[in-house]
Structures are given as C-alpha cells and as structure tokens.
Amino acid sequence: MKIWKGIALIVALVLINVLVHGLAVRYDMTDDRRYSIAPSTQTLLQSLDAPWEVTILLDGELNSGFRRLQRATIELVEELDAIGGRQCTIDYRVSAEIIPQGIPPTVIHERTHKGKTAQTTIYPFALLTYKGKTAMVELLRNNRGLSGEENLNHSIENLEFAFVETIHALTRDSVEKIAFLEGHGELGEREVYDFSQALSQYYQIDRGVLGNEMGVLDDYRVVIIADPQEPFSEMDKYILDQYLMQGGRILWVLNGVRFSSDYLSSQGKTPIVPLDLQLNDMLFRYGVRINPALVQDLQCLPMPVDVSTDPQQPNWQPMPWTYAPLLLTSQASPITRNVMQVSATMASCIDLVGGEDGLRKEILLATSSNSKLTSTPAEVDLAMFDGAESDYQYAFIPVAVSLEGIFSSFYAHLLPPEGLILHAPLRKQSEITKQVVVAAGSTIRNEWQQGQPLPLGYDRYTQAQFGNRDFMVNAVLYLADDTGWMSLRQKQFSLRLLNDQRARDQRVMAQIISIIVPLAVLAIIGMIVIVTRRKRYIG
C-alpha cells in the first residue's frame, strides 16, 4: 500500500512539473511594487514575434550604487523575458569589452573611506537589438540638483520606461508625423534645432502654414505652436479647433507679453506690452488663460553686469536676473517627474479656468515660493536688480499646464469663417484628447555659439544644463501616447540609505553580530539537542 502511495506521489509531481513547465509565476510583495511590470508593457512584449538581444554595458569596477543600478537592470530584463514568452525571448549579457563608437563614457569621482580620490570610467547604457536593428538605452538619469543616491534611485525608477521607449522606437512599423506651425512669426528651424533633433528619433518633423482648407492637419499626431508673435486669423483658429475636436493634440508655447530681445541687449531696457495673438478667447474655452504679465523669481539665473564706475576698466559681476526664473517641475506628472529645473526668460503666468468642466488639469511648471508679477504696460531695465525678499510674496505661480479630457468647440455656436474650404460638418465636442500650454517661448528656444547649436536648456554664462529638452520631449511623448506607457515615468521607489559614517564606525560590531552570533546560536542549539538526547536515551 505504501509503495502505491509513493508511486502516486511521484506521478503527481511529474504531472505538476509538466503542467507548470515554462509557466512563470511571480508575486511582488514589495510595498512600492518595484518588481511589477505595467500592463501596457506586458501587452507590448506579448505582441512581439522575434527574440531580443540585450547587452548591458554597465560593467567593471562599480561602486555599491552603480552595482545596484546594474542589478536592477538585470532583474528588469529577466522580468521582461519571463513576460514575453517563447516568441519574444531575451538573451542578455553584461559586458563593457566592446563599446560602440559614439557612446560617451561617464567619469565618477569618489573619495574613499581613507580620504583618497578614485576615478572610474563607466558606460551606463544598454544596447537592444531586434530584427537586425540596434538602439541604445540610457540607464543613468542625472539631475544636478540631487545627490548621487537620489539620481541612482530615479534611474532605477525610470528603467522600465527607458526600455519600453526604446522598444517602441525599434518596433514602429510607420513613423508618425509632428507639425511645427508657421505663418505667425513662430520660431524658425534654427531656434528649435535641438528640440527638433531630439524629436526626430521618434517622429517625422514637418513645418508649414495652415492655408484655407480643413483637414490639413489630419495626418499629424501633434501640432507644435512655438512662440508666435503675430495674431491668428479666424480661419487658422477654426482649423486648429476642429483638429482638436477630432482628437488632435496641441503643444502651445506662447508668451503673454511682447518685448524686444534686441532692444534689451543693445539698450539695456525694453518696454513690455500685452501680446494679443487673438487666441485668448479660444484658450479660455479650453480651460486656461495666459495673463499679460511677467513673473519674477528670486530663484533665477545670474546675469553679468558691469559694476565699475570707470568705463575703461569694466568689472563684470554676476547679478540675479529675476526675469529669468528657474521653474520648478511637478513630480505628479509623467511629463515632469524627475526632470531638472526648467530655465525661462520673460515668462508669463497661467490661470486655470472653467471650474468643474470634467477636464483633468495639472500644473507642470511653476515659480518658487519667492515670486512676484510685473503687469503690463511697463519697462524692464537690466540696471534694476530688485532682490528684496519682502517684495516677492507670491508662491508657485503656474507657467505650464496640461489639459486632458473632452473639450468643447470654440465654434460650437459660431459660423465658419468665410473662404474656408470645408470637408466635414462642425464637431461641437472632441474625443478624449490632450493639450499642453506653456507660457514662456524661451523654454523651447536653443541658442547658438560659434556656428553650433547649444543644447536646449544650456546656459552659456553659468555653463549649466537645465531640463528644458527633457520637459519638451516628454510633453510631446505624453501628447502622442495612447497606450499609457508614459505613466511608467511615475514609478516611485523608496530610497533606503545607509549611514556611511555609522557603518564605518560600527563595522567590527556588525561583523561580530553577523558571523559570531549565528555560530554561537547554532552551538547552543546543538548542545541543547545533545543534552536532551542523552536524558531521553541514557537516563
């Protein structure tokens, strides 16, 4: 009887092993769900039909922080492999022996516990190869305002998004199109060169005017309106409105104030007056208002000013330029999460209007807790550096917002403009769609130096890089996203740090507790077992 029970047990175990062979069952018991893969990622992987190759270049003599990033990358790749199934297997290796040309190294300067300085060169990247095409995944996110541990933690939070973003790029069958609008004094190709280059890895970039025919924007995923200076006609507004009603997405980068940069540079001052683009009524219908005022902020970029009284011996000193605020980024939105401060010049402010209109409205960029407003008309003078904190009584003034939901048409109760060629009846309500409104044209404009474009968000005077490019690219990705993969940027892991000084001071005690105490406990248990057995069998 016992023999048959044993045989039945063996047969049952074999059958269970056959049934669960190849079935990956995982349960994430962490409180921050760090080992959970988003449903959108699972759907994407299960739709693929060919194997992957992943080469993790982050290798070599790594400190504990980068070893944690390396381990998190390996764990993520293994999780993706388990989800993909047999049709989408992932073969990975960790190797920095062969670095493709053009991949920039990262140099880490560290101070050891003995006080010596150590320098290490690493490559925080991974290479993905799919059907003969290869793309690079950037593993390290570096925000200059955060500590090294915080940056590494944010990098780990961003890993799934970084891999999914690259997979999207490699598996895209057709390239979606993005349109930069022209015809209203918008920034030209030169001024948005860096932004366009960053977008070109995802989309086809076109530029053009609207004309007089409806549907001219139908083929474009996102329309970008980059710092226009001339009013929009009713025909242009109607085309944009109906493009939005059909589910189109718009990135508005507008100024609320007109000023002259050339006059400011040559004369040291400029008058500021309201900039009327004839868009206020339409934007108000959509839930926002750009005010004809400039924000000033004590958290700002410096500007070199000659403080010498002798014109023959100039003395240039950095002075705070409060009209160039460093805007705070929201950690609640996938557009701005873990993005560095965004630099702006002559920025306006935004009000959210409309009350309970069913739209989801989020503030993306705002000033610091020490801000004020300069109403128009007025004059901005470079010689006036007002830094009295008592005058800056406003806090967190919105400069950029996102809007998502069902919008009402501005032309729902108006006749179409004369001369417009119509191909479809008026739509009074939109599908669920999105808009992003930024009240600072400078956030999208790059500068040039010695015939070369500077990175978007780079300040020549301080030689600091700000988050303008990431913010703008993320805004377009958010607008174009229908699958929800941009929400992966909202992952948040708890940062649990060791006290390095305490760890060094108590190193010996920790070694004693971790090595000697377990051995002592085992010895005591062994003695108890021996004594108990003697009493039972000898006594």
Image (tube, rainbow, N blue to C red):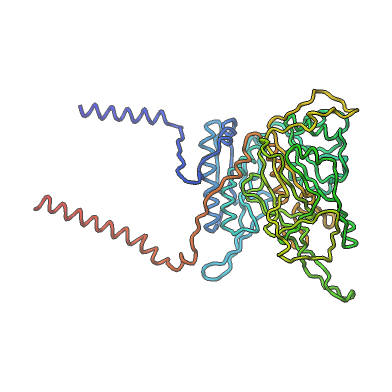
Residue at 76%, 44% (x, y): give it: 289
- Residue at 59% from the left image edge and 40% from the top image edge: 53
x, y percentage for residue 523?
26, 58
Q: Quadrant of the N terminus?
A: top left
Looking at the image, is 264 positioned above or below residue 208? Answer: below
- Residue plotted at (64% across, 57% down): 106
Most extreme residue toward the front, as rendered? Answer: 355
Check the image and report above or below for 105 versus 55. Answer: below
In the rendered view, would you say 265 is above or below 280?
below
Q: Nearer the viewer, residue 261 or 43?
A: 261
Q: Position of residue 4 (x, y in %)?
A: 24, 26
Q: Locate residue 75 relative to residue 459 in the image: left or right.
A: left
The answer to whether residue 38 shows anywhere in this view is yes
Residue at 28%, 27% in the rendered image: 8
Where residue 419 appears, as percent x and y from the top left, is 91, 28
Count of marks overlaid on the render: 0
Q: Nearer the viewer, residue 314 or 122?
A: 314
Is residue 98 something one can see in this rendering? no
Q: Is residue 308 left or right of residue 221?
A: right
* Occupied quadrant, residue 510: bottom left
Q: Position of residue 207 (x, y in %)?
A: 83, 38
Q: Quadrant of residue 65?
A: bottom right
